Amino acid sequence: MSTGQTTGGRPRVVIVGSGFGGLFAAQRLRKAPVDVTLVAKTTHHLFQPLLYQVATGILSQGEIAPATREILRDQENTRVVLGEVSDIDLAARTVTSTVLGRTTVHPYDELIVAAGAGQSYFGNDRFAEFAPGMKSIDDALELRGRIFGAFELAELATDPAEIDRLLTFVVVGAGPTGVEMAGQIAELARRTLHRDFTTIDPSSARVILLDAAPQVLPPFGPLGQKAHKRLNEIGIEVQLGAMVTDVDADGIVVKDGDGHQRRIPAATKIWAAGVQASPLGKQLGDQSGAAVDRAGRISVQSDLTLPGHPEVHVVGDMISLNRLPGVAQVAIQGGRFAADAIMARLAGRSTAPEFHYRDKGSMATISRFSAVAQIGKLRLSGFIAWMMWLVVHLAYIVGFRSRVTTVLHWMVSFLGRGRSERVATQQQVYGRLALEKLGPDFEVSKTGGPGRLGLPADVGGRKSA
């Protein structure tokens, strides 16, 4: 076990997570007289709203996930550390992280927890084996392999029923992520791939968007009805009031509002419904007495701190406060608010007593040249909303190079018919399942190879690195 480095005796600020909340908090502290340690389980900052474009071959993972070190390399007071935080000790004021068998303890004077949220299967975690979520680069690459692979396997199939199953794509969840994913799969089948196969007709692919809710995009109100209409126009079957009761390799079982259960044969299932906050929220709740809801979100005070712990700030998808939505802007503004509070405390100034979220609106794309946007009292749909969506998302992509390549790839996909990223491998599809089957017996050594798993050396006689 090692201890995180400290320098100069200055106040130590530890930030957990490299998402919107963690990254923007670190950037806000750039000129502060503190030593910042940002600990995250990945080496990149993920622009999660565009994950579905990686999954459908529009963008590469590098364009939406720049290296955290590269973003923060000019901040002399900031250190970036790879590791998954396994423990936060509020009494000892330490954060413990692990990676590849290495454990590091990071002492702190001020703490910002921005660990985000993962996919929720509402207590049916077994669904994850057959219906990947959309929360990480690994998820997006696996889905890319499954989506493009389904067309390849359909080309080889001879049984019409098997072809239909392979060309049926079910997206669970009619929120922004589900709507955007369904729209892009439909466009992929009807625009990009329609001339690429000789035996099958990709444009005959069946794309189903289902949700237990009574409407598409519930937070968007009347705009949800416009989105529903547009989805139908591009050939997507929207099935509402449909609750998923089972998922397996060959299909999905849903129960309609009248209690009738039916099965949809489908090779590719995508889960875009529900989120579960980081388990660190429960840890913090147990130690501070703060309530934690069913989704794992912790109730914070109005200034985003924990009861009795003004030095601990929680931001983003982990918090339960005034029904704030789990969107990027809440995390960005919360991260900056926490950083400002830290600088005020260190300077002996009073901190802002309450976090006020400035709602900058919500947007969702439906298809090429079509989107919905809700900004204050303004409600927009169609091409204008789509253009606004492009501009806003470009503004928040970190790095000039990423913006340039993103625009180029969008031009290829939206103005033409191509997709810049169509590489799909067997490892992308089955790597996660293989690791899960190894289970707790799989250990990783400090050098990155298998630990005491008892795997044989490779054919060249070499042992793991």
Image (cartoon, rainbow, N blue to C red):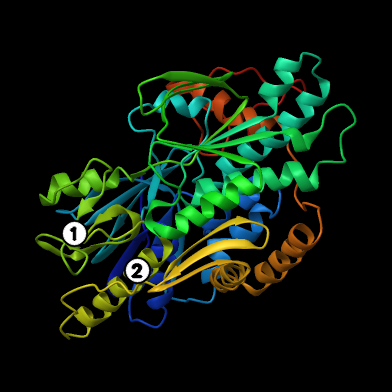
Figure quadrant of residue 361: bottom left
Residue 238 in view in this figure: yes
Is residue 312 shown left or right of residue 376? left
Image quadrant in which the C terminus is located: top right
Image quadrant in which the N terminus is located: top left
Above or below for 89 versus 155: below
Identify residue type, mark 1: Val
Element under label 1? loop
Above or below for 74 versus 133: below
Identify residue type, mark 2: Gly
Residue drawn 67% across the image and 31% down it: 427
Lower position in the chain sequence, tag 1 or tag 2: 1
Element under label 2? helix
Residue 9 in view in this figure: no
Nearest the viewer among 148 and 462 is 148
Nearest the viewer among 429 and 177 is 177
Image x and y of residue 377, in percent: 38, 74
Residue drawn 51% across the image and 45% down it: 178
Mark 1 neighbour class, 10 Å CA radius: few under 14, some 14 to 19, many 20 or more:
many
Nearest the viewer among 116 and 132 is 132
Is residue 24 shown left or right of residue 401? left
Q: Which residue is mark 1?
A: 300
Mark 2 neighbour class, 10 Å CA radius: few under 14, some 14 to 19, many 20 or more:
many
Residue 335, numbered circle: 2
Residue drawn 64% across the image and 45% down it: 55
